[in-house]
Each structure stands twice: as structure tokens, then as C-alpha cells.
Image (tube, rainbow, N blue to C red):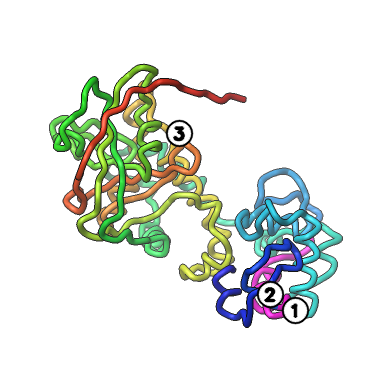
């Protein structure tokens, strides 16, 4: 949305809603066409919202700011400000209705189908159960790979030459950089992305993220290597699916209705990849995500990217082709303190 405002703005000024100064500004009605596409998704419904899975009802401004969590800046705009802003934008739009701010709303596609939609998450669960417990190589519960390919190709991004990543190993002293890469093939134990005997290089976006991912203990030492891309890498990004905004989705080639249908499924895949590997986990638990990553690799991608469950804002990459980056230096650290949070 910000890029669209910058493209059509004729000047710099102060926002009437959040009072931010010296920013590109436009008249609210100039955004009507963009938001009409959002308003067209909705209808009134007395049922609890299925799309937000909260058991609650939502008015339009509440649903928009919750489902598309990054569409509005919640630190600057209160709920009433968002309601007023949407009224000003949409009041003359073809799909706008004041009723949406007085009665609960839901996605029209879900209401029209009686609250049911293709449950891709259930299909994933069925596939996972079969590959772990019944059949390994010839599956009866097959995933629609054509559909998956179409989704993944629209979630693809590229990192350029020079992009930095980090990898760590627990050690009493500084390890040489040649020991900070992926493990030898004979030592490749199964992980969330790699099958046993096939080594992938796991890296993180920051040194802090890789430190947390290693689960280093208090007073232990750790060597952290800095890796730099010497060739671009094309990858499927499954991180922060919930943060994708409606206009970003359309720019990636999804229709809004299509993304609403796939979103729970993509969040399920994201959660499976991000879930921390624990010592007590059974290796069979990794089979579904290993299959997923092997499929992504077969499409010609160099890596898959997913959110870190260990630190806020962190993310990891499982890199299939480690020749595209090089460890250029390393540092050694000793953990001096740890902090835990709990509920």
C-alpha cells in the first residue's frame, strides 16, 4: 500500500489520521479502487468468524486489521482511526456498505459455501500420517504437486550476491572456517529439511538467530561463521505467511480469494518447518517436511526459507546448493547469560 501511495502522491505533507509528518500524502478517495477489491471480499454474517478462527465476530475494520495484520500501523492508528479511514476511502465505492461497520462480517466465499472450503490443512495431516505410518514411497494420499508448484513459484524470492548469513557450532575454541559448513555426507543426520545421508547447509539471517538455533548452554563456547553469497540464490520463502498483505499478495500473482483459501495450509507448512528439532523427536516426524523440501529442490530452487521458532524476527534457510556461498570469517564467543520467558 505504501508503494502505491508513493506512486500516485503529488506532494509531501502530514497524514490527517496518524499525524506523521513529511510523508507522501493522497486524498482518501484516490485509494477507493484499491480498497474496493478488499470490500468485495466481504458480506455480513451472524456466525463467528471462521477465517480468524477465534470464535468471535468482527466488524469490517476489525477484521481487516486482524486478518491483514500489517495493512495498518497499529502503533499509530487506534481502532476508531482505522474505522474512520476506511469510511473516508470507501464511502463512494461500488462494494462499500455502512452495514459492514454495524454488523459482523465474514469472507463472502466462506459464507456462500456454508462455511466450508477445501481443507488443504486436513489433506496435509492425512499425507503426513501415511508417509510416517503406512507407505513411504508409493502413497495413496498424494499431494497435488501441480498446485503446490504454482503456489511455491509465487512465493519465490531471490537473494543477491553479497547477502550475508550465519551458521554456528558449539566449540571450546574457535573452529576453522572449513569446519563451519554443512556436515560430511556420512555424518548427515535427518533434520526438518534434509533426509538422512543428504546434507544441507542450514544458515540464519543473523548471528543472534543462529546462536539461539544452536541452543548453546550457559558458559559454553560457540563458533559463528559468516557466509556470503558468491552467486544469487532463488528460494521459496515460507516465513511470516500471516504478515503478507493483500496488495503484496496480488503483486505476487495470487487473487485474494485464492490466497484466503491457501493461507491456513501455508501457515501449517511454515509451522512444520519452523518447529524446533528436539532430541526426543522421532526421525519419522521429519518425513513430511523432508518430502516438501525435496519437492522444492526438484523445482530448481536453491533453498527454502522459514521462520525461526527460537527468536523473534529471526529466520533460517535450508540451502540445497552450498557452492553458492562461502564462509569468509568466524568468531568465537562464550555465553555469559541466558533469559527465558514462559506463560
Front residue of 252/87: it is 87
In which quadrant of the rendered view does residue 342 lie? top right
User: Magenta region's main secondary structure?
Assistant: helix
Q: Is residue 128 left or right of residue 227?
A: right
Q: Residue at x 14, y 37 (%)?
A: 178
Residue marked by disc 1: 93
Residue at image coords 30%, 59%: 234
Circle 1/circle 3 CB separation < 8 Å: no
Q: Say what secondary structure mark 2 lies in.
A: helix
C-alpha separation, residue under disc 1 versus residue under disc 3? 44 Å
Residue located beneath label 2 in the image = 36
Contact check, label 1 and label 2, Cβ < 8 Å: yes
Whole-percent x and y of residue 274?
43, 39
Quick check: 149 above or below 255?
above
Mark 1 and mark 3 lie on one chain; the one further toward the N terminus is 1
Residue 276 screen position, x and y as percent: 41, 32
Q: Nearer the viewer, residue 118 or 154?
A: 154
Q: Is residue 59 above or below residue 275?
A: below
| Magenta region, residue range | 27-45
Q: Nearer the viewer, residue 140 or 293?
A: 293
Which quadrant does the C terminus fall into? top right
Can residue 133 be seen in this snapshot? Answer: no
Q: Earlier in the sequence, mark 1 or mark 2?
A: 2
User: Does the image show residue 8?
Assistant: yes
Count of numbered circles in the view: 3
Question: Taking 286 as reference, is 74 left or right?
Answer: right
- Counting residues from the start of the chain, the first of labels 2 and 3 encountered is 2
Q: Position of residue 117 (x, y in %)?
A: 60, 56
Amino acid at each position: 500500500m505504501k508503494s502505491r501511495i508513493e506512486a500516485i502522491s503529488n506532494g509531501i505533507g502530514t497524514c490527517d489520521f496518524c499525524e506523521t509528518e513529511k510523508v507522501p500524502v493522497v486524498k482518501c478517495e484516490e485509494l477507493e479502487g484499491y480498497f474496493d477489491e478488499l470490500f468485495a471480499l466481504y458480506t455480513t454474517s451472524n456466525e463467528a468468524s471462521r477465517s480468524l478462527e477465534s470464535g468471535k465476530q468482527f466488524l469490517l475494520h476489525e477484521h481487516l486489521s486482524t486478518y491483514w495484520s500489517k495493512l495498518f500501523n497499529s502503533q499509530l492508528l487506534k481502532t476508531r482511526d482505522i474505522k474512520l479511514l476506511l469510511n473516508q476511502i470507501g464511502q463512494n465505492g461500488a462494494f462499500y456498505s455502512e452495514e459492514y461497520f454495524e454488523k459482523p462480517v465474514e469472507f463472502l466465499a466462506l459464507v456462500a459455501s456454508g462455511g466450508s472450503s477445501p481443507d488443504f490443512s486436513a489433506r496435509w495431516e492425512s499425507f503426513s500420517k501415511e508417509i510416517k505410518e503406512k507407505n513411504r514411497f508409493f502413497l495413496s494420499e498424494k499431494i497435488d504437486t501441480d498446485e503446490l508448484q504454482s503456489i511455491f513459484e509465487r512465493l519465490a524470492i531471490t537473494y543477491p550476491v553479497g547477502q550475508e548469513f550465519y551458521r554456528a557450532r558449539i566449540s571450546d575454541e574457535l573452529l576453522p572456517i572449513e569446519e563451519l559448513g554443512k556436515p560430511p555426507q556420512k555424518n548427515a543426520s535427518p533434520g526438518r529439511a534434509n533426509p538422512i545421508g543428504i546434507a544441507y547447509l542450514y544458515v540464519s539471517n543473523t548471528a543472534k538467530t543462529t546462536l539461539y538455533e544452536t541452543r548453546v548452554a550457559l558458559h559454553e563456547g560457540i563458533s559463528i561463521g559468516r557466509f556470503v553469497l558468491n552467486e544469487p540464490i532463488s528460494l521459496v520463502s515460507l516465513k511470516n505467511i500471516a504478515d503478507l498483505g493483500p496488495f503484496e499478495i496480488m503483486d505476487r500473482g495470487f487473487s485474494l480469494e485464492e490466497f484466503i483459501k491457501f493461507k491456513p495450509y501455508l501457515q501449517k507448512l511454515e509451522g512444520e518447518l519452523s518447529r524446533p528439532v528436539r532430541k526426543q523427536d522421532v526421525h519419522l516426524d521429519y518425513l513430511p517436511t523432508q518430502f516438501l523440501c525435496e519437492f522444492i529442490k526438484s523445482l530448481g530452487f536453491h533453498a527454502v526459507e522459514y521462520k525461526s521458532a527460537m527468536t523473534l524476527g529471526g529466520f533460517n534457510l535450508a540451502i540445497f546448493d552450498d557452492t553458492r556461498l562461502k564462509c569468509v570469517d568466524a568468531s568465537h564467543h562464550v555465553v555469559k547469560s541466558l533469559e527465558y520467558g514462559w506463560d
